[in-house]
């Protein structure tokens, strides 16, 4: 049976996605102009903004009211971020593994493959 995904939202933080490739400097000035602190970290094409804990939905609405500038805004899901970081690491590990397959012994290749399989199993049991 599949587990239902349950997000883990960061209290007091949202992610704001701006339109038209508006840059980090604009995101900072815009966030501060409407009363929120820009944290400076980019996340999946959006920017993390500090809100009052428990008032994330209110902040999301405030940003979405500027729909000519804002593509989307959402609560920051740290569980999703961890999963994305993990899968980026696994992708990198597989790229390294491909190089080993071409350049190295089968024994070293198998050892690294077993390491990746263990990481995937550990991740799956914790997710």
Image (cartoon, rainbow, N blue to C red):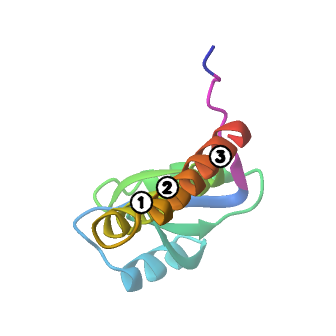
In the picture, measured across the screen, residue 92 lies left or right of residue 11, that is: left
Q: Which residues are magenta?
A: 3-10
Give the quadrant of the N terminus: top right
**Disc 2 and disc 1 in contact, CB within 8 angstroms:** yes
Mark 1 secondary-structure assignment = helix
> Is residue 121 depicted above or below 58 in this figure?
above
The residue that disc 2 covers is: 110
**Residue 98 drawn at (x, y percent):** 33, 62
- The residue shown at (56%, 77%) is 38
Residue 123's tag is 3
**Residue 123 drawn at (x, y percent):** 65, 46
Mark 2 secondary-structure assignment = helix
Quarter holding residue 13: bottom right
**Disc 1 and disc 3 in contact, CB within 8 angstroms:** no
> Is residue 4 depicted above or below 52 in this figure?
above
Mark 3 secondary-structure assignment = helix
- The residue shown at (60%, 71%) is 36
Badge 2 crowding class, 10 Å Cα cut-off, few under 14, some 14 to 19, many 20 or more, is some
Q: Is residue 121 magenta?
A: no
Looking at the image, which is closer to me, 11 or 34?
11
- The residue shown at (74%, 62%) is 52
The residue that disc 1 covers is: 106
Q: Main secondary structure of the magenta part?
A: loop
Residue furthest to the bottom: 25
Give the quadrant of the C terminus: top right
Q: What separation in Å lies between label 3 and label 2 (alpha carbons)?
A: 20 Å
Looking at the image, which is closer to me, 76 or 92?
92
Quarter holding residue 70: bottom left
Looking at the image, which is closer to me, 91 or 37?
91
């Amino acid at each position: 049976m599949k587990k239902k995904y349950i997000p883990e939202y960061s209290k007091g933080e949202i992610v704001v996605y701006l339109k038209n490739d508006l840059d980090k400097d604009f995101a900072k000035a815009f966030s501060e102009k409407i009363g929120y602190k820009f944290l400076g970290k980019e996340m999946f094409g959006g920017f993390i903004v500090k809100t009052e804990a428990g008032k994330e939905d209110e902040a999301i609405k405030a940003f979405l009211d500027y729909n000519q500038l804002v593509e989307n805004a959402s609560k920051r899901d740290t569980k999703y971020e961890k999963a994305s970081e993990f899968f980026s690491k696994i992708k990198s590990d597989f790229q390294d593994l491909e190089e080993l397959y071409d350049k190295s012994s089968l024994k070293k290749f198998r050892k690294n493959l077993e390491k990746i399989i263990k990481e995937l199993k550990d991740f799956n049991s914790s997710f």
